[in-house]
Image (cartoon, rainbow, N blue to C red):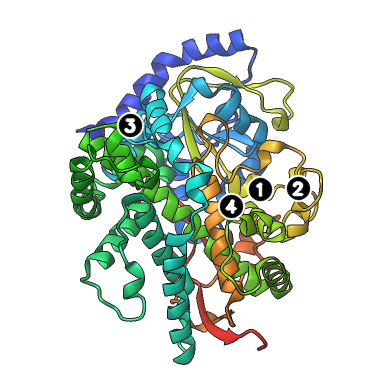
Amino acid sequence: MYVLSIPASEILLSVLSSRRKRKERDRLGALPIPKVKGKKLGNIDVLRALIEADETEYPGDIFFKWAKEYGPTYDMNILWASQIVSLDPENTKFVLSSAFTQFEKGEKFHDMFETFWGDGIFTTDGDAWRTHRANARPFFAQERLSNFSSFEEHVQKMLDILDKLQSEERGFDLQDLFARYTLDTATEFLFGLSTECLDGFLVATPDAPYERFMRAFNELADLGAKRIRIGSTWPLFEITGDQSLKPAKIIHEFVEPIVEMALRQAGSSQDLKEANFLEYLARVTPDKNAVRDESLNILFAARDTTSSLLTWIAYILMEHPEVENKMREEVLEICGDRVPDYSDVRRMKYIDAVLNETLRLFPSVPYNIRRSIHSSALPSPYSKLGRPLYMPPRSSFTFVPVLMHRDPAFWGTDAAEFKPERWLSSTQPMSHPSAFVPFNMGPRICLGQQLAYIQTTYVWARLLQHTTRFVRRSELQPLGSLPPTNEWLRQLDEPVRHSVETVWPHASVILRVKGGLWVRMAPKDT
């Protein structure tokens, strides 16, 4: 009945609130946001286009197409519910920072992800969110991030795997390898116990606990992306039941015994500086569900963000070998063949520029969403209508980093090109500071931002010290995963990177390479 009630409730709310919205709009001196004009009742064809584009488009194309027609801020108005999309960095700044208290993740976002993350830092608002953030923040202090021992243990395992693959002259999916590595390091960093997913990379063991855990993890990520894209009408597409329950059960079965152990040991005299994240949380709260939910929230972010960044850097370096050579020169100049320490990593400025430029073109989170609490006036200077636009209450607001990060209006005529040097200047490379938001901004800026930068730099420093390099094996890509370049170019008047892309970027909750990034190992001089 809940599913069937969604369209009816939206229609009723739309009719009842239209007069009130007009009065509020006039009071704020704002204009109505332009609405996408579909051909079907309730813009059901717009919803269908969103769903179909998820499987066929270059990420962001459908949002870009509508922005060309309706301006950089518009309302998809699906099933009579306002669903605002904005490519305007001033509006992004307004929602995430300037008017932070007027927006939230909201109840509908919580409902989308409740079985994934429960009541954690990513699904809560207000006092609950502030408590979660205050509890988690101290764990990401510099002294914890400067200990690379857990990174090195798993990096060494990964290097051993790469040596084996080279000796056997085997092609492999590097995206999968990085996903396993980051899941292993994230679970050890957070739980003190690694999933050991790297153990299953060379020999397939589909029934092993770590394989079931990783499959469940990936299923939830894909499902979450679909729900975000569809919006509040997602239950209409899961009529047979909540599709997240089965994979979430597998995740919880792994985590809950570790949570219970941490809670039992919470009264010990262990120094908090030596505690893992779970043990640390268990000292803060005795609530088992709170400890589990918060740990899973951080786990999803720690694994996915770093895995995505590692993968896209690999892709970029195979496309730009001159950049890889400069990175290797920097590593060898700073630390030679020895294992880098924290101070070494902080000195690797060129690698830092490569990370930023990769995050610009391939942001780990390509789309993000908030929900308005009250009505407000979005500044909307780039709509060029002379007045702000009216943001209705209790409506979704989607901002699109994957498009803002590539907009020539903010990055110049070379916005589509990969140029790490733009980050080495003494001035900001973009004309608007909010045109670069790979880790969010404002009070909800990602707590793990520095962890992602440090770990990614460390991993690539170790890979660049190795005697081999990655070479593409595009012929191993699964059927249907190579980019449909001609189709992309046919559909878009102003392609940005479409003609040069040799992989297919795919927007899940994070930005991935569709079908994986298939490579082989080769000596550095070939």
Quarter of the image for residue 472 reads bottom right
**In x, y percent, where is residue 21?**
50, 14
Q: Does label 4 or label 2 sit earlier along the sequence?
A: 4
Q: Is residue 57 visible?
A: no
- Amino acid type, residue under disc 4 in the picture: Asp
**In x, y percent, where is residue 192?**
32, 54
- What whole-number distance in Å separates the C-alpha atoms at marks 1 and 2? 8 Å
Q: Does label 3 or label 1 sit earlier along the sequence?
A: 3
Location of residue 317 with respect to 431 vertically, above or below: below
**Labelled pair 1, 2 in contact (Cβ < 8 Å):** yes
Q: Is residue 451 visible?
A: yes
Q: SS for tag 4? A: helix
Camera-near label (4 vs 3) is: 4
Q: Which residue is mark 2?
A: 411
Q: Residues within 10 Å of mark 1 (few under 14, many from 20)?
A: many
- What whole-number distance in Å separates the C-alpha atoms at marks 4 and 3? 27 Å
Q: Residue at x 59, y 56 (%)?
A: 362
**In x, y percent, where is residue 11?**
37, 25
Q: Nearer the viewer, residue 278 or 108?
A: 278
Identify the mark at residue 7; answer none if there is no mark.
Answer: 3
Location of residue 327 with respect to 380 vertically, above or below: below
Left or right: 315 in relation to 429: left
Q: SS for tag 2? A: helix
Q: Which residue is mark 4?
A: 61
Q: Which residue is mark 1?
A: 405
Q: Does label 4 or label 3 sit earlier along the sequence?
A: 3
- Amino acid type, residue under disc 2 in the picture: Trp
User: Residue most toward the bottom?
Assistant: 168
Q: Residues within 10 Å of mark 3 (few under 14, many from 20)?
A: some
